[in-house]
Image: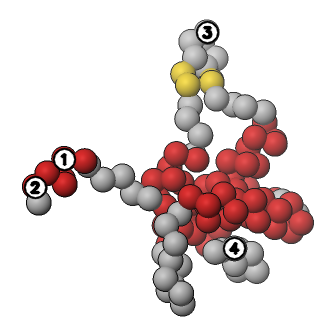
Amino acid sequence: MWNDLLDSTFIEEYWSEAAELSNLVLESLFDAAHEVCVAYAPLLPAEAPVPVSYKLAEIMQARHIWTQFAGGNRDEMGTDGFTVTVYPLVFAARDLLRPKTSPLRKLGR
């Protein structure tokens, strides 16, 4: 894992509900989130420090997994009869791991 579960201050700063989860649940969520993030993220050089964006992506992914378990799909909301599709935080986590670049930027070379 990129986040240290023993020092939960950083995690709880971005996901306050994490403090309410048991250590076993939190560890399972972060293990699963880490596997997903590692599979998607560019490989870091050996002994390189883990970027903050990788740690944030791992938190976002863990929170997303927990939300799926805790409240179902939750991909739409609206109490007035209208619905708005809400995209999961997974997209934001992906962007932290591999920031998007414009294909037009390559034309200027």
Measuring from the top left, give residue 81's x and y in whole percent: 61, 9
Q: What is the secondary structure assignment of the residue under circle 4?
A: loop
Q: Which residue matches tag 2?
A: 108
Residue drawn at point x = 11 percent, y = 60 percent: 109
Q: Quadrant of the N terminus?
A: bottom right
Determine crowd level at label 2: few under 14, some 14-19, many 20+ residues with C-alpha closer than 10 A: few
Q: CA distance from mark 3 to mark 2?
A: 48 Å
Q: Which residue matches tag 3?
A: 81
Measuring from the top left, give residue 53's x and y in whole percent: 48, 67
Going from the N terminus, do you reach mark 3 or mark 1 first? 3
Q: Which residue occupies the foreground of this view, 76 or 97?
A: 97
Residue drawn at point x = 57 percent, y = 69 percent: 55
Q: Which mark is residue 104?
A: 1
Q: Which residue occupies the foreground of this view, 42 or 83?
A: 42
**Tag nearer the camera, 4 or 2:** 2
Query: Can you tell which quarter of the image residue 68 is in?
Result: top right
Going from the N terminus, do you reach mark 3 or mark 4 first? 4
Q: CA distance from mark 1 to mark 4?
A: 35 Å
Q: Which residue occupies the foreground of this view, 104 or 29?
A: 104
Looking at this view, name the residue that lies furthest to the top: 81
Residue drawn at point x = 78 percent, y = 36 percent: 71
Going from the N terminus, do you reach mark 1 or mark 4 first? 4
**Tag nearer the camera, 1 or 4:** 1
Q: Amino acid at mark 2?
A: Gly
Q: Which residue matches tag 4?
A: 1
Does the residue at mark 4 contact the one at mark 2 (Cβ under 8 Å)? Answer: no
Q: Amino acid at mark 1?
A: Leu
